[in-house]
Image (cartoon, grey):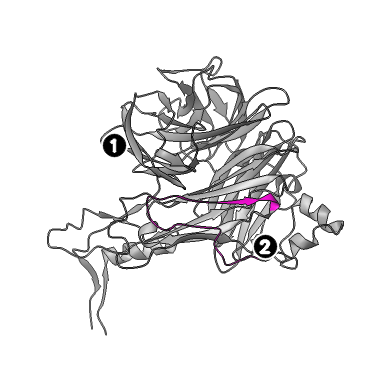
């Protein structure tokens, strides 16, 4: 019998490749490497997905992408590096996928959407990167902006980030919508969605792979799971993106829902596009993984209305303390000493204008030790009357080693840094070169424990175009959570969107290959 040898490093490589998020090369064996001390190596392949941004002819979508310098040393040395996002394939009419896009169905019935239904994807990248440290941008006007699928490899893979930003200048959906393109996964939670009469919410499911994916969508309201007429076994064809209108999944009208997306086959990118008849539109990104403590950073100081939506997982109810981490301290908002969320149910709480002029972050923590895992998000409104605009802030994990957010613009971006723990956080913030010119700038900030520091980022010297922000906490300091607000004003409407960058997973821990696991025998 032939002897088979499997190294720990090789096993780690196989596991990384299996997830589909990143791949890496195992470290060479050295005499002084301990099997108990894993090395951190840069990933060599990353995947990102962006849903179709809008079906409005008045939309203008900007795609931006960036890979930071620094981490890629040793990643794919000697190999050409690529990072591209290309259009997804529109699902064919006879694919068997149930249509839940009412607007497109109505056009098709009238014979007005024949041109759109005949579209095919192009192999030409919409956006591509050439080198680390230099961002790229591309703009598509009207309803032709596609969903994108793509990957980065070699030196462009570690920390690769992309975003789509859409400005719609008129109509019910007039708004500024922003979404960080995300890695594919098999499980997503979206507290803050709605089937209310003045809302039109779509779950966009994007499949990056060469085979079809199958997804299930569950809805949870204030009394628990909602009865859904459809929602199971939704097929997303290969390299395609499918929008699912929530109100077609259930007859229940609910102001605040939690959406749970899982896949039974394959993997997808998922995001909720929410349109409010009175307050514009924006994307709702997935909440951080369920946990007893959650941080929701970056509530603008001029927010006129803030609504907290929480869903409790597990068998037990959740009792949570609510703290607002502001500029100078943390305090409990009036009337919110604690909130109670029943197991398997979604609860909402009106915080009104909780920040009162100062940017802040909400920190949820269990009343007692242990605690029930929860997911959470905020719906935030700026402006009043017919000049309102909404955005969403999902709970987010700490930045970790490094995070990047793209499409920052001069005098339009604000970065909120929150230190939710008991220790101050020291954070280095780097503004990249601009997409059309400019020199990078870096500055280090200290965020006091239990507070939120809102800064106007230092723009690149000689900035032309937009730029990326890379956030790097000092590993010896306290944890930090981040949120970037991009704001523009159009016809008196304070349009804005908020993104919450988390760790970019640019490196992976790989066990040292100092010892082999062998199957003995002949």
Q: Residue at x 70, y 37 (%)?
A: 174
Mark 1 surroundings: few (<14), some (14-19) or many (≥20) residues within 10 A: some
Secondary structure of the residue carrying tag 1 is: loop
Secondary structure of the residue carrying tag 2 is: loop
- Residue 214 lies in the magenta stretch: no
Q: Quadrant of residue 522?
A: bottom left
**Is residue 161 left or right of 2 when viewed as pictured?**
right
Counting from the top left corner in percent of width and height, residue 423 is at: 31, 27
**Is residue 298 left or right of 24 when viewed as pictured?**
right
Which residue is under mark 1?
474
Q: Is residue 88 above or below residue 307?
A: below
Placement of the N terminus among the 4 image quadrants: bottom left
Query: Magenta segment, which residues?
Result: 121-143
Residue at the far right in the pictured view = 110
Which residue is under mark 2?
90
Q: Residue at x 17, y 57 (%)?
A: 34
- Residue 123 lies in the magenta stretch: yes
Out of 144 and 54, give the one closest to the viewer.
144
Residue at the far front in the pictured view = 462
**Is residue 81 left or right of 488 when viewed as pictured?**
left
Out of 181 and 17, give the one closest to the viewer.
181
Out of 368 and 144, give the one closest to the viewer.
144
* Tag of residue 52: none
Counting from the top left corner in percent of width and height, residue 515 is at: 19, 65
What is the number of callouts on the image?
2
Tell me if I can see residue 427 in this picture: no
Q: Earlier in the sequence, mark 2 or mark 1?
A: 2
Tell me if I can see residue 163 in this picture: yes
């Amino acid at each position: 019998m032939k002897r088979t040898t499997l190294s720990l490093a090789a096993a780690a490589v196989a596991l990384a490749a299996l997830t589909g998020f990143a791949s890496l090369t195992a470290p060479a064996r050295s005499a002084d490497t301990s099997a108990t001390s894993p090395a951190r190596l840069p990933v060599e392949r990353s995947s990102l997905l962006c849903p179709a941004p809008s079906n409005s002819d008045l939309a203008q979508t900007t795609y931006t992408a960036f890979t930071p310098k620094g981490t890629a040393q040793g990643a794919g040395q000697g190999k050409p590096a690529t990072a591209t996002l290309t259009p997804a394939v529109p699902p064919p009419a006879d694919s068997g996928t149930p249509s839940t896009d009412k607007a497109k169905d109505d056009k098709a019935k009238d014979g007005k959407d024949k041109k759109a239904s005949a579209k095919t994807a192009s192999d030409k990248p919409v956006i591509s990167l050439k080198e680390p440290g230099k961002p790229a941008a591309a703009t598509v006007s009207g309803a032709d902006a596609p969903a994108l699928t793509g990957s980065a490899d070699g030196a462009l893979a570690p920390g690769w980030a992309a975003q789509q930003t859409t400005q719609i200048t008129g109509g019910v959906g007039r708004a500024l919508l922003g979404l960080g393109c995300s890695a594919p996964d098999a499980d997503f939670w979206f507290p803050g969605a709605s089937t209310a009469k003045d809302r039109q919410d779509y779950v966009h499911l994007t499949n990056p792979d060469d085979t079809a994916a199958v997804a299930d969508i569950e809805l949870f309201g204030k009394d628990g799971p909602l009865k859904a007429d459809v929602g199971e076994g939704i097929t997303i064809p290969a390299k395609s993106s499918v929008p699912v209108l929530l109100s077609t999944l259930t007859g229940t009208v609910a102001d605040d829902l939690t959406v749970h997306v899982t896949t039974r086959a394959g993997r997808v990118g998922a995001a909720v596009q929410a349109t409010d008849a009175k307050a514009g539109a924006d994307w709702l990104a997935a909440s951080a993984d369920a946990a007893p403590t959650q941080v929701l950073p970056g509530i603008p100081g001029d927010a006129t209305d803030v609504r907290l939506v929480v869903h409790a997982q597990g068998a037990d109810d959740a009792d949570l303390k609510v703290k607002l981490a502001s500029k100078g301290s943390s305090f409990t908002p009036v009337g919110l000493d604690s909130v109670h969320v029943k197991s398997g149910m979604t609860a909402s709480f009106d915080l009104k204008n909780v920040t009162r002029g100062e940017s802040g972050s909400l920190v949820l923590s269990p009343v007692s030790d242990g605690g029930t895992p929860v997911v959470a998000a905020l719906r935030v409104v700026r402006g009043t009357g017919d000049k309102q605009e909404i955005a969403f802030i999902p709970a987010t994990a700490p930045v970790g080693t490094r995070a990047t957010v793209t499409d920052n613009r001069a005098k339009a971006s604000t970065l909120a840094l929150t230190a939710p723990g008991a220790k101050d956080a020291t954070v280095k913030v780097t503004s990249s070169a601009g997409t059309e010119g400019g020199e990078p700038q870096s500055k280090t900030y200290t965020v006091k424990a239990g507070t939120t520091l809102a800064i106007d980022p230092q723009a690149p010297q000689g900035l032309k175009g937009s730029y990326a922000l890379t956030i790097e906490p000092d590993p010896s300091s306290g944890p930090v959570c981040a949120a970037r607000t991009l704001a523009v004003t159009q016809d008196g409407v304070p349009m804005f969107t908020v993104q919450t960058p988390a760790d970019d997973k640019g490196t992976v821990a790989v066990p040292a290959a100092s010892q082999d696991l062998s199957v003995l025998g002949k």
